[in-house]
Image (cartoon, rainbow, N blue to C red):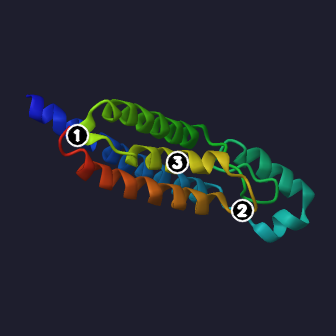
Amino acid sequence: MPKRLSKFKKWILFDYALLSLFVSGVYIAFNHEFFKVNWKRYYNNITYEEKVDKILKHGVFWIPGNLHSLTAPLLIALLLGGALLSLIIFALVWKNYLVRTWLPLFSFMGFILPLLIRYDENILKLLVIGYFLVILSSSFSVAALRQW
């Protein structure tokens, strides 16, 4: 039984990263499918802009004319949960000298990146960069945690 539990502990961050990426992708795809926006009309018609803002306020993006901020509670919860899991795993493996690694902190940075950075970039690009960093670092951490 301990070996099974050890395997589970080793793969938990990578599994959570894949699950989180899948849920985020499905959520964003459904949001774009159900909330199609006519961008020409959005920029030229104030009443249409107000209606779209009210609808999308509870979707993936709050659109004040651009896609700069992430406000979806589901995506924020997924990212914060992954960041917390990364910190917990880092704290657990730091106690063991044989499996001490910094890789869970890179996963933490990948999960937190879309939540902290706000600049003239599309939030989807930040999500892609963040999840790329998370998947890469969590896959390398599986190999680093082989003794755990």
Q: Give the residue at x 55% y 56%.
A: 127
Q: Amino acid at mark 1?
A: Leu
The correct choice, above or below, for 9 with respect to 125 in the image is above
Q: Which residue is mark 3?
A: 109
Q: Nearer the viewer, mark 3 or mark 2?
A: 3
Residue 99 percent across, percent down from the top left: 26, 41
The mark found on residue 98 in the picture is 1
Q: Are marks 1 and 2 in contact (CB under 8 Å)?
A: no
In 3D space, how far apart are the residues under numbered discs 1 and 3 (Cα atoms)?
Answer: 23 Å
What is the spatial separation of the Cα atoms under label 3 and label 2, in whole angstroms? 32 Å
Which residue sits at x=41%, y=35%?
85
Residue 128 in picture, x, y percent from top left: 52, 61
The residue that disc 2 covers is 37
**Hey, what amino acid is under mark 2?**
Val
Indicate whether 61 appears above or below 38. above
Residue 69 has which mark? none
Q: Quadrant of residue 44?
A: bottom right
